[in-house]
Amino acid sequence: MSTHEQTFPADFTFGVATSAYQVEGGIENDWAEWERAGKLKEPEARCGRAVDHWNRYEEDYRLARAVGATAFRISLEWARIEPERGRFDGAALEAYRERLLKMKAQGLRPVVTLHHFTHPTWFHRETPWHQPASVDAFRRYARECAALLEGLDALVISFNEPMVLLLGGYLQGAIPPGIIDGPTTMRALENLVRSHAAAREELLSRLGRVELGISQNTLAFAPDRWWHPLDRALVRLSAQAYNHAFHEALATGKLRVTMPGVASTRADIPGARDSVEFIGVNYYTRAHLRFVPRAPFIEFKYRDTQGRGLTDIGWEDWPEGFLQSLREVKRYGRPVWITENGIDDRAGTRRPHYLHTHLQQVLAARASGVDVRGYLYWSLLDNFEWLEGWGPRFGLYHVDFDTLERRVTPACDYFRAVAISRKLVPPGSPTSPDLLSKNGTGT
C-alpha cells in the first residue's frame, strides 16, 4: 500500500456495535423462552442480566468515546416496546428515547437497529414471519420506533442478518422459531423484504428522510475440494443466495433465490426497489463448502488454510475475504457501512492484529473505489453470544461476568490509536493509554 492508502479520511467514522438482548439484561422474549427450553449448547446457560447495559449505558457510552468511537450501534428490543400484541409500553419508549439523546450528547452518532434476531413472546404464535400478518405487525412497531429517532440523524438498520435468521430459524431449526421447512422459509423471506419496505414507509412518513439499510452477514465462500464441480457450483449458488439475494431485492424490487433440492422463490415486492440508502456489511470469516448426497446437500467447514489459527469460536481468520465482500457490494451503487466485524479472542492477545489486517482491507476497498463510510467493531463489550452462551469474547473491553466490571484490553489502545490518528498504525505503536486509564477502565 502507498502512504495515501494507509490513511482514513477525516469524515470516516469509527464506532462500536451492540445488540439489546446481548447486553441490556432483564428481557423476556422468544430467546429467553428458547433458553428455558434448554436449547443452547450449554442447556443451563441464561442471558439473564446480560452485562447490565440497561443500567450502565452512560458508562458504556464513555467507554466508547474513550476508544475514539463517534458512532454507537444499538438495537431496540421489540419485546420491551410491545410486550403484548397491540400494547406499546410508553415507559420503554421513553427510556430508549432518553438513551438515544444521551448517546447523541456524548458525541456518538446513533446507529439504530429495529430488529436484531429477537421477538416478543407473542410473535411466533400470533404473527410469524411466514404469515402475511407479520408485515402489519412490523409496520406498527416501526411506526412507534420512528418517533424515537426524530432529530437524531441516526443511521437506521431495519433487519440485522436476515439470512442468518431464516437459515437458523426456518431451515435448521436451531434458533427461534425452530422450524425446518424450505417453502416456509421462502414465505418468511418474502415477508421480511415486505416488512423492510413497510418500515421504510413509516419512517419516511414521520421523519421526512431517513438513512436506512440492512446489515447483511457476508461470508467468503470457497470449494472444500477446489477440483470438484459440485463444490464449485455450491459456492456460486451460496454466494448469490446468502450474500446477495436480500440486497438485490432491496435494489431491484425482485426477490430471486435458488436453493436446489431445498426451496426457491421468485417474487416481486412492491416498495422494495431502491429502498436503502446504504449497504450494511457484517463480515467475520470464510466457509468451505462441500456437496454431500443428502438434503440439504451442503456441508460447511472452517479450515485454517494459512496457518493463522482458527479463532476461538472456530472460524477461519481470512481478512482477504473482507476485501472481496466489500468489492462485491459496490455493484449496488450505495455507500457502504461495516456494521460488524470482530474476533472471538478469549485470551485478548490476537485482537489488535485482527483489527490491523481487517482495516487494511477496508483501505484497499476504498482505494479500489468502494465508498466505505464507516467501521463499527463488534463488539464494544464481551456479551451473551446466542447459542454459544457466555463462552465467546468479542469485546474491545473485557467484562468480568461475575462483577460486570469492564476492563481495558490491548485492543482498546489499538482501536483508539487508529481512530484518533486516522492512520493504519501497526499494532504496538505508541498510543495514549493515559486517557484510557482515566476514563476507560469501567471501575
Image (tube, helix red, strand yellow):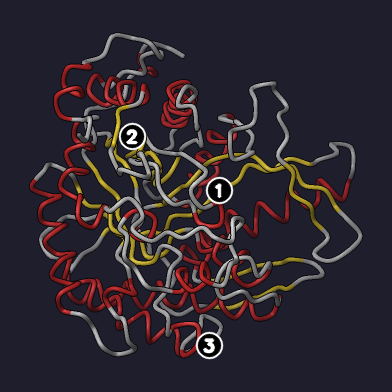
Query: What residue type is disc 2 on?
Result: Tyr
Q: Quadrant of residue 74?
A: bottom left
Could you tell me which quadrant the C terminus lies in? Answer: top left
Query: What residue type is disc 1 on?
Result: Thr
Q: Position of residue 313 (x, y in %)?
A: 59, 40
User: From what the image shows, is residue 176 above or below residue 86?
Assistant: above
User: From what the image shows, is residue 431 above or below residue 404?
Assistant: above
Q: Position of residue 167 (x, y in %)?
A: 63, 64
Q: Is any part of residue 367 visible from this angle?
A: no
**Viewer-nearest of labels 3 and 2?**
2
- Judging depth in this view, the residue of 331 and 237 nearest the camera is 237
Q: Which mark is residue 1?
A: none
Residue matched to label 3: 131
First-in-chain label (3 vs 1) = 3
| Spatial CA span between label 3 and label 1 | 27 Å
Q: Quadrant of residue 356?
A: top left
User: From what the image shows, is residue 69 above or below residue 90?
Assistant: above
Q: Residues within 10 Å of mark 1 (few under 14, many from 20)?
A: many
First-in-chain label (3 vs 2) = 3
Q: Which mark is residue 218?
A: 1
Q: Position of residue 61 (x, y in %)?
A: 19, 43
Name the residue located 21 percent from the left edge and 77 percent from the top edge.
205
Q: Quadrant of residue 257?
A: bottom right
Residue matched to label 2: 397
**Viewer-nearest of labels 2 and 1?**
2
